[in-house]
Image: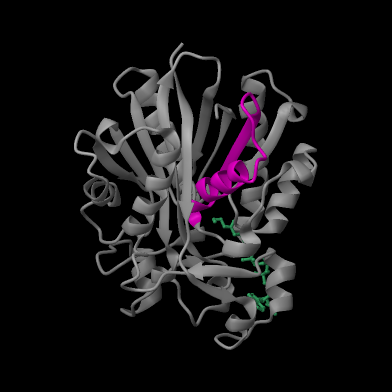
Protein backbone atom coordinates (compact mmCIF):
# COMPACT_ATOMS: atom_id res chain seq x y z
CA UNK A 1 0.00 0.00 0.00
CA UNK A 2 1.23 3.49 -0.83
CA UNK A 3 1.44 5.92 2.09
CA UNK A 4 2.65 9.45 2.63
CA UNK A 5 5.91 9.30 4.60
CA UNK A 6 7.28 12.30 6.47
CA UNK A 7 10.84 12.75 5.21
CA UNK A 8 11.56 16.30 6.34
CA UNK A 9 10.46 18.76 9.02
CA UNK A 10 11.20 22.44 9.52
CA UNK A 11 10.00 25.41 11.55
CA UNK A 12 10.59 29.06 12.21
CA UNK A 13 9.34 31.70 14.63
CA UNK A 14 9.79 35.48 14.59
CA UNK A 15 12.73 37.13 16.33
CA UNK A 16 10.70 39.33 18.68
CA UNK A 17 9.89 37.75 22.05
CA UNK A 18 6.92 39.08 24.02
CA UNK A 19 7.02 37.86 27.62
CA UNK A 20 4.23 37.73 30.18
CA UNK A 21 6.00 40.53 32.00
CA UNK A 22 5.83 42.62 28.81
CA UNK A 23 2.08 41.93 28.63
CA UNK A 24 1.63 43.19 32.19
CA UNK A 25 2.45 46.62 30.76
CA UNK A 26 -0.13 46.31 27.96
CA UNK A 27 -3.23 44.84 29.66
CA UNK A 28 -4.50 44.17 33.18
CA UNK A 29 -2.85 40.79 33.66
CA UNK A 30 -0.01 39.09 35.52
CA UNK A 31 2.69 36.60 34.68
CA UNK A 32 1.29 34.50 37.53
CA UNK A 33 -2.25 34.39 36.02
CA UNK A 34 -1.07 33.59 32.49
CA UNK A 35 1.34 30.89 33.66
CA UNK A 36 -1.15 29.24 36.02
CA UNK A 37 -4.14 29.34 33.64
CA UNK A 38 -2.35 28.60 30.36
CA UNK A 39 1.26 27.45 30.86
CA UNK A 40 2.44 30.17 28.47
CA UNK A 41 5.51 32.23 29.49
CA UNK A 42 6.29 34.02 26.23
CA UNK A 43 5.36 34.13 22.55
CA UNK A 44 6.95 35.31 19.29
CA UNK A 45 5.50 38.29 17.45
CA UNK A 46 6.15 39.11 13.78
CA UNK A 47 7.64 42.46 12.79
CA UNK A 48 7.00 44.17 9.47
CA UNK A 49 9.79 44.11 6.93
CA UNK A 50 11.68 41.27 8.65
CA UNK A 51 10.55 38.37 6.46
CA UNK A 52 7.98 37.39 9.08
CA UNK A 53 4.71 37.56 7.15
CA UNK A 54 2.71 34.35 7.12
CA UNK A 55 3.94 33.33 3.66
CA UNK A 56 7.54 34.34 4.42
CA UNK A 57 7.59 32.25 7.58
CA UNK A 58 5.92 29.43 5.62
CA UNK A 59 8.71 29.57 3.05
CA UNK A 60 11.44 29.56 5.73
CA UNK A 61 9.97 26.53 7.48
CA UNK A 62 9.50 24.79 4.12
CA UNK A 63 13.12 25.35 3.08
CA UNK A 64 14.30 23.65 6.28
CA UNK A 65 11.93 20.72 5.73
CA UNK A 66 12.97 20.39 2.08
CA UNK A 67 16.63 20.53 3.04
CA UNK A 68 16.15 17.67 5.49
CA UNK A 69 14.18 15.65 2.94
CA UNK A 70 16.65 15.98 0.08
CA UNK A 71 13.68 16.71 -2.21
CA UNK A 72 14.02 19.81 -4.35
CA UNK A 73 11.21 22.36 -4.73
CA UNK A 74 10.94 21.52 -8.46
CA UNK A 75 9.98 17.97 -7.53
CA UNK A 76 7.00 18.99 -5.37
CA UNK A 77 3.61 18.05 -6.81
CA UNK A 78 1.51 19.75 -4.15
CA UNK A 79 1.76 22.52 -1.54
CA UNK A 80 -1.00 22.77 1.04
CA UNK A 81 -0.91 25.47 3.71
CA UNK A 82 -3.13 25.46 6.78
CA UNK A 83 -3.70 29.05 7.88
CA UNK A 84 -6.31 31.44 9.24
CA UNK A 85 -4.03 34.48 8.86
CA UNK A 86 -3.06 34.66 5.18
CA UNK A 87 -1.07 37.67 3.99
CA UNK A 88 -4.21 38.69 2.09
CA UNK A 89 -7.54 37.09 1.27
CA UNK A 90 -6.19 35.94 -2.07
CA UNK A 91 -3.92 34.72 -3.57
CA UNK A 92 -3.35 31.85 -1.19
CA UNK A 93 -0.34 31.66 1.09
CA UNK A 94 0.46 28.37 -0.67
CA UNK A 95 0.83 30.15 -4.03
CA UNK A 96 3.15 32.74 -2.46
CA UNK A 97 5.23 29.95 -0.91
CA UNK A 98 5.28 28.16 -4.27
CA UNK A 99 6.63 31.32 -5.94
CA UNK A 100 9.29 31.86 -3.28
CA UNK A 101 10.42 28.23 -3.42
CA UNK A 102 10.38 28.02 -7.21
CA UNK A 103 8.16 24.95 -6.98
CA UNK A 104 6.79 25.44 -10.49
CA UNK A 105 5.21 21.99 -10.88
CA UNK A 106 3.21 22.02 -7.63
CA UNK A 107 -0.51 22.64 -7.31
CA UNK A 108 -0.82 25.04 -4.37
CA UNK A 109 -3.75 25.97 -2.14
CA UNK A 110 -4.67 26.87 1.44
CA UNK A 111 -6.90 25.04 3.88
CA UNK A 112 -8.88 27.00 6.46
CA UNK A 113 -9.79 24.88 9.46
CA UNK A 114 -8.97 27.05 12.47
CA UNK A 115 -6.20 25.67 14.61
CA UNK A 116 -6.76 22.28 12.96
CA UNK A 117 -5.51 23.61 9.61
CA UNK A 118 -2.27 21.64 9.64
CA UNK A 119 -3.90 18.25 10.21
CA UNK A 120 -6.58 19.00 7.62
CA UNK A 121 -3.84 19.98 5.16
CA UNK A 122 -1.85 16.86 6.04
CA UNK A 123 -4.89 14.71 5.38
CA UNK A 124 -5.53 16.29 1.96
CA UNK A 125 -1.92 15.87 0.86
CA UNK A 126 -1.67 12.34 2.23
CA UNK A 127 -4.88 11.31 0.47
CA UNK A 128 -3.48 12.68 -2.81
CA UNK A 129 -0.41 10.52 -2.29
CA UNK A 130 -2.41 7.43 -1.34
CA UNK A 131 -4.61 7.75 -4.43
CA UNK A 132 -1.60 8.25 -6.69
CA UNK A 133 -2.28 11.79 -7.89
CA UNK A 134 0.80 13.17 -6.14
CA UNK A 135 4.24 11.85 -5.21
CA UNK A 136 5.90 14.64 -3.20
CA UNK A 137 3.92 17.11 -1.11
CA UNK A 138 4.78 20.00 1.16
CA UNK A 139 2.40 20.57 4.07
CA UNK A 140 2.70 23.82 6.01
CA UNK A 141 1.06 25.45 9.02
CA UNK A 142 1.75 29.18 9.08
CA UNK A 143 0.19 31.93 11.15
CA UNK A 144 0.59 35.58 12.00
CA UNK A 145 -2.06 35.68 14.71
CA UNK A 146 -0.66 38.95 16.07
CA UNK A 147 -2.24 40.60 13.01
CA UNK A 148 -5.74 39.71 14.23
CA UNK A 149 -5.08 40.07 17.96
CA UNK A 150 -6.98 42.68 19.93
CA UNK A 151 -4.22 44.04 22.18
CA UNK A 152 -6.87 45.56 24.48
CA UNK A 153 -8.47 42.18 25.20
CA UNK A 154 -6.62 40.41 28.03
CA UNK A 155 -8.71 37.27 27.59
CA UNK A 156 -7.16 36.55 24.18
CA UNK A 157 -4.00 38.63 23.60
CA UNK A 158 -2.03 36.68 26.21
CA UNK A 159 -2.67 33.41 24.39
CA UNK A 160 -1.53 33.94 20.82
CA UNK A 161 1.75 33.87 18.92
CA UNK A 162 3.22 33.69 15.40
CA UNK A 163 5.25 31.06 13.56
CA UNK A 164 5.33 28.32 10.98
CA UNK A 165 6.14 24.64 10.65
CA UNK A 166 6.29 22.36 7.65
CA UNK A 167 6.70 18.73 6.66
CA UNK A 168 7.63 17.11 3.36
CA UNK A 169 5.73 13.96 2.45
CA UNK A 170 6.79 11.47 -0.18
CA UNK A 171 5.07 8.34 -1.44
CA UNK A 172 6.41 5.08 -0.09
CA UNK A 173 5.31 1.46 0.17
CA UNK A 174 7.02 0.73 3.50
CA UNK A 175 4.79 0.05 6.51
CA UNK A 176 5.64 3.42 8.06
CA UNK A 177 4.32 6.90 7.30
CA UNK A 178 0.94 8.46 7.96
CA UNK A 179 -1.25 5.54 8.94
CA UNK A 180 -4.42 7.66 8.93
CA UNK A 181 -5.87 11.03 9.81
CA UNK A 182 -9.31 11.29 11.42
CA UNK A 183 -11.12 14.62 11.12
CA UNK A 184 -14.33 16.04 12.52
CA UNK A 185 -16.18 19.37 12.42
CA UNK A 186 -19.19 20.92 14.13
CA UNK A 187 -20.31 24.26 12.72
CA UNK A 188 -23.00 24.59 15.39
CA UNK A 189 -20.34 26.04 17.67
CA UNK A 190 -18.79 28.46 15.13
CA UNK A 191 -19.35 31.41 17.46
CA UNK A 192 -17.05 30.12 20.22
CA UNK A 193 -14.04 31.32 18.21
CA UNK A 194 -14.08 33.58 15.19
CA UNK A 195 -12.69 36.58 13.45
CA UNK A 196 -13.80 38.51 10.40
CA UNK A 197 -12.70 41.36 8.20
CA UNK A 198 -14.60 44.08 6.39
CA UNK A 199 -16.11 41.52 4.01
CA UNK A 200 -17.86 39.64 6.83
CA UNK A 201 -21.58 39.13 6.24
CA UNK A 202 -22.55 37.00 9.25
CA UNK A 203 -25.42 38.99 10.82
CA UNK A 204 -24.74 37.86 14.39
CA UNK A 205 -21.17 39.16 14.14
CA UNK A 206 -22.14 42.44 12.51
CA UNK A 207 -24.64 43.06 15.30
CA UNK A 208 -21.93 42.83 17.93
CA UNK A 209 -19.24 45.03 16.42
CA UNK A 210 -21.13 48.19 15.55
CA UNK A 211 -18.97 48.84 12.54
CA UNK A 212 -15.72 48.84 14.52
CA UNK A 213 -12.70 46.94 13.25
CA UNK A 214 -12.42 43.79 15.23
CA UNK A 215 -10.22 40.87 15.86
CA UNK A 216 -10.19 37.31 17.08
CA UNK A 217 -12.97 36.67 19.57
CA UNK A 218 -13.19 33.65 21.80
CA UNK A 219 -15.44 32.17 24.44
CA UNK A 220 -12.47 30.50 26.06
CA UNK A 221 -14.28 28.79 28.88
CA UNK A 222 -16.87 27.06 26.67
CA UNK A 223 -14.20 26.20 24.14
CA UNK A 224 -12.09 24.60 26.86
CA UNK A 225 -14.99 22.33 27.86
CA UNK A 226 -15.57 21.27 24.23
CA UNK A 227 -11.87 20.81 23.50
CA UNK A 228 -11.02 18.20 26.14
CA UNK A 229 -13.53 15.46 25.20
CA UNK A 230 -13.19 16.12 21.46
CA UNK A 231 -9.41 15.77 21.60
CA UNK A 232 -9.40 12.72 23.87
CA UNK A 233 -12.14 10.87 21.99
CA UNK A 234 -10.71 11.34 18.51
CA UNK A 235 -7.22 10.45 19.70
CA UNK A 236 -8.44 7.19 21.23
CA UNK A 237 -10.52 6.32 18.11
CA UNK A 238 -7.55 6.99 15.85
CA UNK A 239 -5.36 4.63 17.89
CA UNK A 240 -8.07 1.96 18.09
CA UNK A 241 -8.50 2.14 14.30
CA UNK A 242 -5.00 0.66 14.05
CA UNK A 243 -5.32 -1.71 17.00
CA UNK A 244 -2.89 0.46 18.95
CA UNK A 245 -3.08 1.32 22.63
CA UNK A 246 -1.77 4.34 24.51
CA UNK A 247 1.25 2.21 25.53
CA UNK A 248 2.28 1.98 21.88
CA UNK A 249 2.51 5.78 21.58
CA UNK A 250 6.06 7.12 21.78
CA UNK A 251 4.98 10.75 21.72
CA UNK A 252 1.68 12.60 21.61
CA UNK A 253 1.94 16.05 20.03
CA UNK A 254 -1.21 18.03 20.76
CA UNK A 255 -2.24 21.45 19.53
CA UNK A 256 -0.57 23.91 21.91
CA UNK A 257 -3.51 25.99 23.17
CA UNK A 258 -3.41 25.60 26.93
CA UNK A 259 -1.37 23.32 29.22
CA UNK A 260 -4.49 22.58 31.28
CA UNK A 261 -6.33 21.31 28.19
CA UNK A 262 -3.34 19.14 27.30
CA UNK A 263 -3.05 17.76 30.84
CA UNK A 264 -6.78 17.02 30.98
CA UNK A 265 -6.63 15.16 27.65
CA UNK A 266 -3.58 13.16 28.74
CA UNK A 267 -5.32 12.30 32.01
CA UNK A 268 -8.45 11.08 30.21
CA UNK A 269 -6.33 8.98 27.87
CA UNK A 270 -4.16 7.72 30.75
CA UNK A 271 -1.06 8.90 28.86
CA UNK A 272 1.70 10.16 31.19
CA UNK A 273 2.78 13.75 30.55
CA UNK A 274 6.36 12.62 29.84
CA UNK A 275 4.98 11.15 26.60
CA UNK A 276 3.32 14.44 25.67
CA UNK A 277 5.33 17.11 23.86
CA UNK A 278 4.70 20.71 24.81
CA UNK A 279 6.41 23.94 23.80
CA UNK A 280 3.57 26.39 24.41
CA UNK A 281 5.56 28.02 27.22
CA UNK A 282 7.81 29.45 24.46
CA UNK A 283 5.34 30.18 21.67
CA UNK A 284 1.78 30.35 23.03
CA UNK A 285 -0.99 29.24 20.71
CA UNK A 286 0.20 29.50 17.09
CA UNK A 287 -2.97 27.91 15.65
CA UNK A 288 -2.19 25.85 12.51
CA UNK A 289 1.53 26.24 13.10
CA UNK A 290 1.61 24.72 16.58
CA UNK A 291 1.73 21.02 15.68
CA UNK A 292 4.33 21.23 12.87
CA UNK A 293 6.57 23.49 15.00
CA UNK A 294 6.30 21.03 17.91
CA UNK A 295 6.88 18.05 15.62
CA UNK A 296 9.99 19.66 14.15
CA UNK A 297 11.38 20.55 17.57
CA UNK A 298 10.63 17.11 19.00
CA UNK A 299 12.41 15.41 16.09
CA UNK A 300 15.42 17.74 16.19
CA UNK A 301 15.66 17.16 19.98
CA UNK A 302 16.12 13.45 19.23
CA UNK A 303 12.79 12.34 20.71
CA UNK A 304 11.69 10.37 17.63
CA UNK A 305 13.23 7.39 15.90
CA UNK A 306 12.14 5.35 12.88
CA UNK A 307 9.25 3.06 13.78
CA UNK A 308 8.00 5.18 16.68
CA UNK A 309 4.26 5.82 16.81
CA UNK A 310 3.47 9.53 17.01
CA UNK A 311 -0.03 10.78 17.74
CA UNK A 312 -0.90 14.26 16.48
CA UNK A 313 -4.11 15.69 17.88
CA UNK A 314 -5.78 19.03 17.27
CA UNK A 315 -8.79 21.20 18.01
CA UNK A 316 -9.84 24.63 16.83
CA UNK A 317 -12.31 27.11 15.42
CA UNK A 318 -15.13 25.77 13.32
CA UNK A 319 -15.30 23.76 15.43
CA UNK A 320 -12.78 21.40 13.90
CA UNK A 321 -10.72 18.64 15.44
CA UNK A 322 -8.67 15.65 14.39
CA UNK A 323 -5.96 13.10 15.06
CA UNK A 324 -3.22 11.55 12.93
CA UNK A 325 -1.39 8.36 13.69
CA UNK A 326 2.11 8.44 12.23
CA UNK A 327 4.70 5.67 12.19
CA UNK A 328 7.85 7.75 12.15
CA UNK A 329 10.06 7.34 9.07
CA UNK A 330 13.22 9.40 9.63
O1 LIG B 1 -6.71 27.08 19.74
C1 LIG B 1 -8.08 26.86 19.64
C2 LIG B 1 -8.62 26.31 20.85
N1 LIG B 1 -8.43 27.22 21.95
C3 LIG B 1 -8.81 26.83 23.13
O2 LIG B 1 -9.26 25.71 23.23
C4 LIG B 1 -8.69 27.79 24.28
C5 LIG B 1 -9.57 27.29 25.37
N2 LIG B 1 -9.68 28.13 26.52
C6 LIG B 1 -8.70 28.45 27.39
O3 LIG B 1 -7.55 28.13 27.18
C7 LIG B 1 -9.09 29.14 28.68
O4 LIG B 1 -10.47 29.16 28.77
C8 LIG B 1 -8.54 30.56 28.83
C9 LIG B 1 -7.04 30.52 29.08
C10 LIG B 1 -8.84 31.37 27.58
C11 LIG B 1 -9.17 31.24 30.03
O5 LIG B 1 -8.98 30.46 31.19
P1 LIG B 1 -10.21 30.14 32.16
O6 LIG B 1 -9.67 29.38 33.28
O7 LIG B 1 -11.26 29.50 31.32
O8 LIG B 1 -10.61 31.58 32.66
P2 LIG B 1 -12.01 32.33 32.52
O9 LIG B 1 -12.24 32.72 31.10
O10 LIG B 1 -13.07 31.53 33.21
O11 LIG B 1 -11.72 33.63 33.36
C12 LIG B 1 -11.50 33.57 34.76
C13 LIG B 1 -11.20 34.96 35.27
C14 LIG B 1 -12.20 36.01 34.80
O12 LIG B 1 -12.40 36.92 35.84
P3 LIG B 1 -13.72 36.83 36.76
O13 LIG B 1 -14.87 37.00 35.82
O14 LIG B 1 -13.67 35.47 37.40
O15 LIG B 1 -13.54 37.97 37.71
C15 LIG B 1 -11.47 36.71 33.68
O16 LIG B 1 -11.88 38.02 33.47
O17 LIG B 1 -9.93 35.38 34.79
C16 LIG B 1 -10.05 36.67 34.17
N3 LIG B 1 -9.07 36.80 33.13
C17 LIG B 1 -7.83 37.27 33.33
N4 LIG B 1 -7.21 37.70 34.45
C18 LIG B 1 -5.93 38.11 34.31
C19 LIG B 1 -9.19 36.44 31.83
N5 LIG B 1 -8.05 36.69 31.17
C20 LIG B 1 -7.19 37.21 32.09
C21 LIG B 1 -5.86 37.64 32.01
N6 LIG B 1 -5.28 38.08 33.15
N7 LIG B 1 -5.14 37.61 30.87
In this rendering, position of residue 90 left or right of residue 122: left
- Residue lying farthest to the top in this orientation: 1
Residue 231 on image: x %, y %: 63, 42
Name the residue at 22% across, 43% down: 102
Look at 47% across and 69% down and name the residue there: 15
Q: Quadrant of ligand 1?
A: bottom right
In this rendering, is residue 213 above or below 59? below
Q: Quadrant of the C terminus?
A: top right
Q: Is residue 59 magenta?
A: no
Q: Residue 95: horizontal and vertical position, in percent?
A: 23, 47
- Residue 86 position (above or below residue 151): above
In x, y percent, where is residue 209?
38, 76
Instruction: Classify residue 202 by image quadrant.
Output: bottom left
Give whichever of 251, 27 is nearer the camera: 251
Q: Is residue 132 above or below residue 142?
A: above
* Horizontal side, residue 169 vs residue 303: left or right: left
Horizontal and vertical percent position of residue 121 = 40, 39
Is residue 221 at least partly visible in the picture? no
| Magenta-colored stretch includes residue 302 | yes
Residue visible at 29% across and 64% down in the picture? 200
Q: How is the image coloured?
A: one colour
Q: For residue 135, say whether it is visible.
A: yes
The span picked out in magenta is 287-314
- Residue 219 vertical placement versus 138 (above, below): below
Q: In the displayed structure, does residue 156 sit left or right of residue 20? A: left
Q: At 67% from the left edge and 47% from the top edge, which residue is drawn?
A: 277
Q: Is residue 82 left or right of residue 109?
A: right
Amino acid sequence: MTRGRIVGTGSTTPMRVLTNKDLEKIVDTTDEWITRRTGIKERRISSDGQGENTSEMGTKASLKALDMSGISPEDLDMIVVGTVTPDCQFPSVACLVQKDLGAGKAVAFDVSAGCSGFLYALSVADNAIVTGSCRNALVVGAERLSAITNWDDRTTCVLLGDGSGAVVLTAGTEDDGILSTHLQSDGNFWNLLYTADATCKIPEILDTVEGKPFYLKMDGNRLFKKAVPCLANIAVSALEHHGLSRDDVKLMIPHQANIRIIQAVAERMLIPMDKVYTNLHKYGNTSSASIPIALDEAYREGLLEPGDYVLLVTFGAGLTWGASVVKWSI
